[in-house]
Image (cartoon, rainbow, N blue to C red):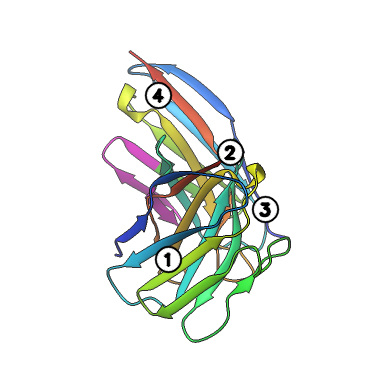
Amino acid sequence: KNEVEQSPQNLTAQEGEFITINCSYSVGISALHWLQQHPGGGIVSLFMLSSGKKKHGRLIATINIQEKHSSLHITASHPRDSAVYICAGDGGSQGNLIFGKGTKLSVKP
Amino acid sequence: SAVISQKPSRDICQRGTSLTIQCQVDSQVTMMFWYRQQPGQSLTLIATANQGSEATYESGFVIDKFPISRPNLTFSTLTVSNMSPEDSSIYLCSVEGGLNTEAFFGQGTRLTVV
């Protein structure tokens, strides 16, 4: 059974800090998604990675295929970054995503 | 890309009743996924809905409890039947473009059963 593990579960940071969220995944997953979920429940896709590194604004996502590990970095964090960040792998038996438990990020001003 | 309109965004329902959640996609998609997110938990797949065939349910989910319709390539509904407080969750629909492509989600339906 394919699995995705994410850490930390909760993260509190001061505005301006550099933030890292980690994700490990099992063998059957070939692509990793980073998602952002706001309090209302809606989910927005941030990145989809199968190799290397992607950057969008202050967000950077990296993936190490050999180690089956991915990280999401937020530079110069801001209170509006406060949300739940979820990593998900594409190894579901029905073509679905398999989700980590999420990291609840709170950025204090 | 795909834009998904999901409704209702939230509802408070009496136990024993049913609620139907709708998802409308702005483009034709083959597969739609329905997920449940219980409080403090990760998303769990309920079923996959393909147009023209019955939905495929994950272990622990049954058609009588979560009937799904998929009348065309842009629309699907999930019904939560005979609700109990344990059904209080966020329900989300999703489409995924295929192997190694981005996933898109509805806005979620926050269901509270009292």
Q: Is mark 1 on a helix, strand or loop?
A: strand
Residue B11: x and y in percent read: 44, 45
- Pick whichever of labels 4 and 3 is earlier in the sequence: 3
The verdict on residue A56 being magenta is yes
What span is colored magenta in the figure?
Answer: A43-60
Q: Hey, what amino acid is under mark 3?
A: Glu
Q: Hey, what amino acid is under mark 2?
A: Val
Q: How far apart are marks 4 and 2 (CA)?
A: 42 Å
Q: How far apart are marks 2 and 1 (CA)?
A: 30 Å
Q: Nearer the viewer, residue A97 or A71?
A: A97
Residue A107: x and y in percent read: 39, 20
Q: In which quarter of the image is the C terminus of chain A?
A: top left
Q: Hey, what amino acid is under mark 1?
A: Val
**Label of residue A3 in the image:** 3
Q: Which chain carries label 1?
A: B
Question: Do badges 1 and 4 share one subunit?
Answer: no
The residue at which mark 4 appears reads as A18
**Label of residue B95 in the image:** 1
Q: Distance between the residues labelled 3 and 1?
A: 20 Å
The residue at which mark 2 appears reads as B114
Q: Nearer the viewer, residue B84 or B62?
A: B84
Q: What element carries label 4?
A: loop
**Count of numbered circles in the view:** 4
Front label number (3 vs 1): 1
Q: Can residue A35 be seen?
A: yes
The verdict on residue A8 being magenta is no
